[in-house]
Image: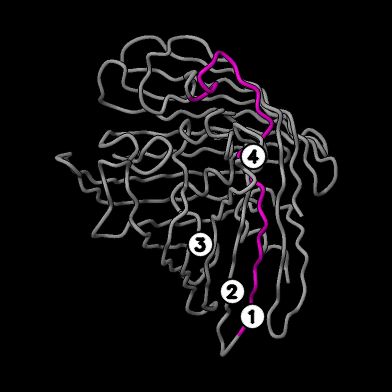
Amino acid sequence: MNTTHTAIALATALAAGTAHAADFKAGEWDIALGGIVNAYYTHTSCSGSQAVDGVALASKGLGCGGTDGRTVIGNGLLPNALTTMAKTRQEGLDISATLMIGAAVASGDAISNNSNVDVRQGFMTFGNADIGSVKLGRDYGLFGSSAILGDMTLLGAGAPVSATQRNRVTLGHIGSGYTYLGTYGQVAYTLPVSGNFSATVALMSPVDAGSSHIGRNEPQLQALATARFGGGKAWLGVKHQKFEGVGGAAGFTMNGAEVGASVTLGALGLAANIQSGKGLGVLTDGDSGNRKQTNLLLQATWQATAKTKLGLNWGESRLKDGTASDLRGNSNVTAGLYYGLTKSVTLVTELSRTMSRPVVGNEARMNGVALGGIVFF
């Protein structure tokens, strides 16, 4: 089996293009087994105002685990993951099944993560080049996928927020450049590829936004269209879901759109992505209620040598409306050095600064450093 299929199944490896699966036959099925393992020494220090409510990434409560500083040895933006993919062709249809099982490195004690399992993918597909393909099961969302897969910090840590790294992963630019793409039960249809154009539309199982807003009667809708051109690609995505209020809370509708592009010009790589809408959420769907929001990510990388890539990116998630100490927005700037020790192992050094601003008042600040590495197999 072509290892490219395993990279697509991993999704995370898609951005790196360095997955190396074990391929073998089982009857009429082609089986591919691959995965990722990573760990980073991170340290954060927090300062400035702590009077910022909501998902303030740079606050002591989130960024530094309730203290002025925090050290963690844990995952970066990616979990450790083992992915199995099986495919075959029957009666003119290409059929595949994918299962990903993940695990986190760090926790607040020496025991609890021994039994934590992170299952992000478990889906089947069927179709062919003439009719397109259908996906059924649990997989990553479409909205935000191009942004996170193109984010250089996918191989590193980005914002090493202690509250999420312990028991899970760091945030990259989630909440400070884009909303997390999420994982959903879904029914998705991908159109037949036409030249350099591809498109997918999906119905997602509706999700809740905390305990006060639930998704009930209608599925979430997402769609993504991508056009490739010499040296790059451009994309357009949308998402929509109604949230019903609970206990007297007013319901609201999440509507969002994004547009972005990436291009490679020799050793220089450039990328930009913007998301805008209402009810998108800082980290995940609807977590900031019915507020208008804009997420922006800008990135430049430089392939300095065959093994060394340098990168700098900046992102901001900005909310409108709100009063007093409500979160106005998070921003993060990260500078990174990515060294290919071998074709499978990448060593990473990143320095980052995250800021969280309230509607009124001074900002909270978090400085972070991440040192470690990742292996794709």
Callout in the foreground (3, 2): 2
Measured Cα–Cα span from mark 3 to mark 1: 25 Å
Residue at the far bottom in the pictured view: 91
Residue 197: give its label. Answer: 3
Residue at 71 percent across and 68 percent down: it is 32
Check disc 2: other Cα within 10 Å, few if <14, some if 14-19, many if 20+: many
Residue at 29% x, 52% y: name it: 241
Which residue is label 1 attached to? Answer: 88
The amino acid type of the residue labelled 1 equals: Thr
Q: Residues within 10 Å of mark 1 (few under 14, many from 20)?
A: some
Q: Nearer the viewer, residue 199 or 279?
A: 279
Look at discs 2 and 4 and give the one toward the viewer.
Answer: 4
What's under tag 4, amino acid-wise? Ile
Magenta part of the chain = 62-89
Q: Are marks 3 and 2 in contact (CB under 8 Å)?
A: no
Q: Real-space Cα distance between discs 1 and 2?
A: 6 Å
